[in-house]
Image (cartoon, rainbow, N blue to C red):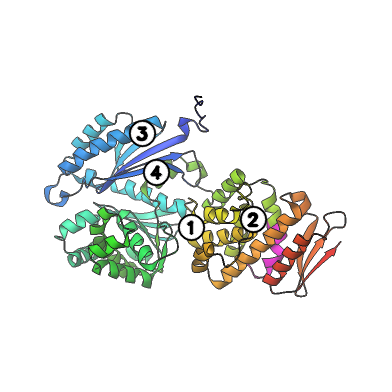
Amino acid sequence: MALPPLASPLSPAQRAAIIDLGSNSVRMVVFEGVARNPVPIFNEKATLQLGKGLEKTGCLSEPGMHKAMEVLGRFGRIATAMGADPFVVVATAAVRDARNGPQFIEAAVRHLPQASFRILRGEEEADYAAAGVLCALPEADGLAADIGGGSMELIRISGGTYTNAVTTPLGVIRLAERADDNVLRARDLAEKVLADISWLPSARGRPLYLVGGGFRALARAEISRLRYPLNMVHLFRLTQAQAWEMARWCLDVDAKTLEKLGNVPRKRVEQVPYAAAVLEALLMLQEPDEVVFSAEGLREGWYMRHVAAEVQHLDPMQALAREMAARLGRNTNLPAELVAWTAPLFAAHESPEQSELRGLACLVSDIGSYDHPQYRAEQTYRRLLYCHGVGFEHRARAFLALVLAVRYEMGLNDPVLKPSRKLLSPEMFERAVQLGLALRLAYTLCGGNEALLRDSHLAIEDGTLVLTIRANGLRMAGSALRRRFEKLAEALHMPGRICED
């Protein structure tokens, strides 16, 4: 029997596509809907090396241009079939600087007449890069460096916008050519270029946000080298000392060793030392207090500026947690009640960050409700740890995932929890366990109904955990309820008492 076609939940007008035509590669991303956290439903890259030889010839490479026409034609058919609107192609440094750049764009328009084309000025490229960083980190205050094949944009970010921007010829392909494939010479060239930027000292001592494929390759190498528990470049953080160590290692390592790590794209391996050379120059001049990698750059910046401008003021973690709760939970009214119900356990010694994490945990506390009960704890843990969300810090992921695993009764010795053990301090790990046990008790009491939760409340009185249940509400006789209350009291290192009001 023939099956009827599945109905599409979204209209084509709710999709937007951007092709980023860079010096090293071309990538198309198709975003679905309008959300604070961009949702890519198609993301594909092809390496063209359009800018190879540009430093010497002043022109785009012939092989790169030929391959570009094939790739653009294919991308255009996909974007059209997916109903993407708007659909734009933006070209950056290589096309901008090449003598034959305008002719190349004219030919590309013939291959892709359904898209709008724009050759970005250096300032525009910096603007989109800054918007991409701010998409994930609205409170960012420091220096953003977006490295490509032909250029590197530097942007001073502060107060939710950028105050200074400059484009430099420090893209990894162009830098290697200018240095005659000598990494030490490349580092000297980078230092000289950066030393001439007058406003750079204003970012000294503040975070350095690294964007672009060359820097992502550094992060991938370091993640693999350190056996870091999350293979996620986005929001991977290093101290200044750790960043120095990474850069020096990447400068000295040979290509075979990098390839054996298995986490660096093969076509990026030869560019790693040059990205490391630029990073060393940045570290020397800026002396950042930390280095933060961002996978959100020009494309996400374009999305936030042109597609999702009306929601960019929202907090990205809050927005994602609310979306997950609405899509996967049973009762959107309960989280606010859970925040108030759990407050007495932590209010006396809770930092603003801890309070925010507790609120997020309450928001997502029921997202495993429709999973198979045998796998609910593990499924929910992995869903939170690995979810796509631009604002989810790695520690926040590890904390929230652990809270939900405990809420769904995963044993603390389960090897699945290894990432949380590695990413969280002992104090944060313990707090997550305590909150998870409190949420488990809450759902035992109310079954996910806020009115039933109001029939009970928790308090700490003279060093004792007290659960009070209204006499006309739920009864305390259930062994599961008593057992879960006792586990919570034990985790809080205090005796417990259940009483009726």
Callouts 2 and 1 close, C-beta under 8 Å: no
Which amino acid, by three-letter code, is at mark 3? Ile
Classify the position of the C terminus by image quarter. Answer: bottom right
Query: What secondary structure is found at the residue carrying circle 1?
Result: loop
Which amino acid, by three-letter code, is at mark 4? Trp
Give the x, y percent position of residue 468. 81, 62
Q: Nearer the viewer, mark 2 or mark 1?
A: 2
Left or right: residue 186 versus residue 410 is left
Which amino acid, by three-letter code, is at mark 1? Glu
Identify which residue is drawn at 28% across, 36% down.
72
Where is mark 2, residue-wise?
362
Q: CA distance from mark 2 to mark 1?
A: 23 Å
Query: What secondary structure is found at the residue carrying circle 3?
Result: helix
Instruction: Give the farthest residue toward the left.
Output: 57
- The magenta span reads 339-351
Taking depth in this image into account, of 12 and 416 the one nearest to the observer is 416
Q: CA distance from mark 2 to mark 3?
A: 40 Å
Mark 2 or mark 3: whose residue is earlier in sequence = 3
Q: Which disc is residue 139 wearing?
A: 1
Identify which residue is drawn at 27% across, 38% down.
71
Where is mark 4, residue-wise?
302
